[in-house]
Image: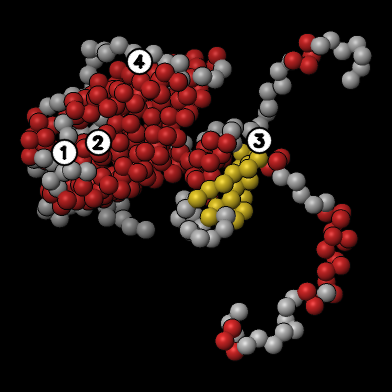
């Protein structure tokens, strides 16, 4: 910001948005299961987002509970980091606990 | 209408109870039909789906009530014959629901989103009071329908009420439109609380509430939301519409023509 900027500009209201912000929608299919991401929608605020999520994503009995979160509040891993983040795990089968003899009693673990 | 005669409009033997049930059924049916006109035209995709959901809820309520009305009447009628083969004077919906909603006409200006959310709110609040009253009906079928429908009405009221507040406490443009919509809709609300012989009979035999008993809870909830929406509850008007007695506004014939044309042209057609 240049030194000549009048202070009033700092208090100027944000310009009207052409479109409502984007929200990510999470639906819990039934009690005891996790909320799962199922899509996104546009809504003016959180209250409207929950209502519209109900209408868009649960009208065929898909859920018993809803979460919404502003898409801009989600921090995602960088796709460019995919190589260093995830590829090193490909050859470490020993991290899966498949090398132990299990007692018969816990056979279905 | 020559075609109507050829395809056999039905004539009902009307009892007070049948009239009572048909008033609710037809109000839900015509309201659903008007809301369905928004399908594919909503201001945003999400609200388009929401409005269509509301319309489908109301259509489901109408189907259940018409099926029950057909059973009360007997004589081989069913929900379809009641919806598609009755003539205008045997429909008993509130006049409010037949007014154009999406497209303005010469006699009903407006027809915008503000009219839509306001009408939805006024009617959902009314229906909620109706369903609560019917939850103790002596008619087990009506009780069952009411218990299911009151949940739908609660959501309709919340969704539409939120919009009323958003528009009323929004911009100069949105609040101006909402006020204009209120001025158009309000005169038709008087009919929601008329108490006539049909209401008195229903109240006496425990079938359901008389309309005048619905006014206090309705006005309470409407006033609550209007306060948040910076709206003033308008004064009562001397005008009382008469759709519930079968005398309709000029718009009713057109909406019935659109609704009924297929069954009139291809009697008994199924798909």
Q: Looking at the picture, does residue B189 appear above or below residue B92?
A: above
The chain to which mark 3 is attached is A
Q: Earlier in the sequence, mark 4 or mark 2?
A: 2
The residue shown at (19%, 28%) is B213
Q: CA distance from mark 1 to mark 3?
A: 45 Å
Residue B105 visible at all: no
Q: Looking at the picture, does residue B257 appear above or below residue A57?
A: above
Give the image quarter of residue B245.
top left
Q: Position of residue B127 (x, y in %)?
A: 29, 35
The residue shown at (65%, 40%) is A70
The residue shown at (40%, 37%) is B156
Residue B172 visible at all: yes
The chain to which mark 1 is attached is B
> Of the numbered discs in the image, which one, if any, rests on residue B130?
2
The chain to which mark 4 is attached is B
> Of the numbered discs in the image, which one, if any, rests on residue A21?
3
Between B256 and B204, which is closer to the camera in this rendering? B204
The chain to which mark 2 is attached is B
Q: Position of residue B112 (x, y in %)?
A: 47, 25
Q: CA distance from mark 3 to mark 4?
A: 33 Å
Q: Secondary structure at mark 2?
A: helix
> Of the numbered discs in the image, which one, if any, rests on residue B233?
4
Q: CA distance from mark 1 to mark 4?
A: 27 Å
Asked if both marks, 2 and 1, belong to the same chain, the answer given is yes
Asked if both marks, 1 and 3, belong to the same chain, the answer given is no
Q: CA distance from mark 4 to mark 2?
A: 21 Å
């Amino acid at each position: 910001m240049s030194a000549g900027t009048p202070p009033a500009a700092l208090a100027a209201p944000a310009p009207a948005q052409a479109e409502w912000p984007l929200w990510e929608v999470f639906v819990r299919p039934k009690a005891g299961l996790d909320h799962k991401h199922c899509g996104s929608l546009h809504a003016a605020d959180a209250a409207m987002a929950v209502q519209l999520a109900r209408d868009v994503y649960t009208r065929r009995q898909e859920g018993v509970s809803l979460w919404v979160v502003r898409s801009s509040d989600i921090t995602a891993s960088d796709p460019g980091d995919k190589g260093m983040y995830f590829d090193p795990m490909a050859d470490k089968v020993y991290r899966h606990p498949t090398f132990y003899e299990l007692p018969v009693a816990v056979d279905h673990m | 209408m020559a075609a109507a005669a050829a395809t056999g409009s039905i004539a009902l033997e009307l009892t007070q109870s049948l009239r009572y049930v048909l008033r609710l059924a037809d109000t839900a049916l015509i309201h659903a039909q008007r809301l369905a006109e928004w399908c594919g035209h909503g201001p945003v995709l999400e609200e388009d789906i929401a409005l269509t959901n509301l319309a489908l809820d109301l259509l489901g309520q109408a189907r259940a009530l018409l099926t029950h009305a057909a059973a009360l009447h007997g004589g081989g009628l069913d929900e379809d014959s009641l919806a598609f083969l009755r003539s205008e004077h045997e429909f008993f919906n509130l006049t409010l629901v037949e007014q154009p909603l999406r497209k303005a006409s010469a006699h009903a200006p407006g027809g915008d989103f503000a009219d839509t959310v306001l009408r939805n709110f006024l009617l959902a609040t009314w229906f909620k009071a109706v369903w609560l009253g019917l939850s103790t009906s002596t008619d087990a079928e009506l009780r069952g329908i009411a218990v299911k429908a009151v949940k739908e009405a609660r959501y309709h009221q919340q969704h539409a009420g939120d919009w009323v507040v958003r528009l009323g406490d929004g911009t100069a443009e949105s609040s101006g439109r909402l006020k204009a919509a209120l001025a158009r809709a309000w005169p038709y609300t008087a009919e929601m609380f008329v108490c006539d012989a049909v209401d008195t009979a229903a109240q006496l035999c425990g079938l359901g509430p008389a309309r005048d008993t619905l006014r206090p809870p309705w006005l309470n909830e409407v006033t609550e939301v209007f306060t948040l929406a910076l709206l003033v509850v308008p004064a009562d008007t001397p005008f009382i519409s008469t759709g519930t007695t079968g005398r309709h506004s000029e718009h009713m014939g057109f909406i019935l023509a659109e609704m009924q044309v297929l069954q009139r042209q291809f009697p008994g057609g199924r798909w």
